[in-house]
Image (cartoon, rainbow, N blue to C red):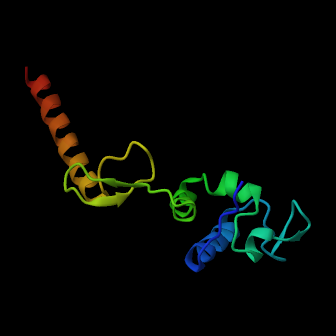
Amino acid sequence: MEVKRMGAKEYKDACAQIRGLCANYDRVTGSCWALDTECPQMITQSLVCKYFRDVLLEDKEGRALKAEIMGEDLRKVCKVCGQHFQALSNRAKYCAKCAKKTERKRKAEWARKARRLVDV
């Protein structure tokens, strides 16, 4: 397996994610509980920690970082406005702005239909 290298921004984001979410990271000493040494992911700019790769990058907060590091393009085109947006799931169809508008329209239509059925 090829070792992926991180840029400065990805490295900074990875360290922040480790400090906030890693179950093996000791926040007092900055060491890894699983290895009883300094966290290997925090001292190198390559993906060396298996827990970081398999758990933290697969987490909801880590998907965007994974896309940056691995070179995956999770950007999709919004069905309403046509702009590119960062998708966090494979079901996303709309950018955040259009998703709100679309949801309001859908709920309003549902309410109109429900009122029509009650009036009958």
Q: Is residue 102 left or right of residue 50?
A: left
Q: Is residue 117 left or right of residue 55?
A: left
Farthest residue in the bottom direction? Answer: 8
Residue 102 percent across, percent down from the top left: 22, 48
Q: Residue at x 89, y 63 (%)?
A: 35
Q: Residue at x 30, y 60 (%)?
A: 84
Q: Is residue 104 left or right of residue 21?
A: left
Q: Nearer the viewer, residue 63 or 60?
A: 63
Quarter of the view holding residue 115 = top left
Q: Is residue 113 left or right of residue 99?
A: left
Residue 112 percent across, percent down from the top left: 12, 35
Q: Residue at x 15, y 37 (%)?
A: 109
Residue 12 percent across, percent down from the top left: 61, 77
Count how many numbered circles sit on residues in the image.
0
Q: Nearer the viewer, residue 36 or 21?
A: 36
Farthest residue in the top direction? Answer: 120
Q: Residue at x 26, y 53 (%)?
A: 78
Residue 49 percent across, percent down from the top left: 76, 61
Quarter of the view holding residue 8 = bottom right
Quarter of the view holding residue 119 = top left
Q: What quarter of the picture does the C terminus occupy?
A: top left
Q: Nearer the viewer, residue 77 or 104?
A: 77
Farthest residue in the left direction? Answer: 120
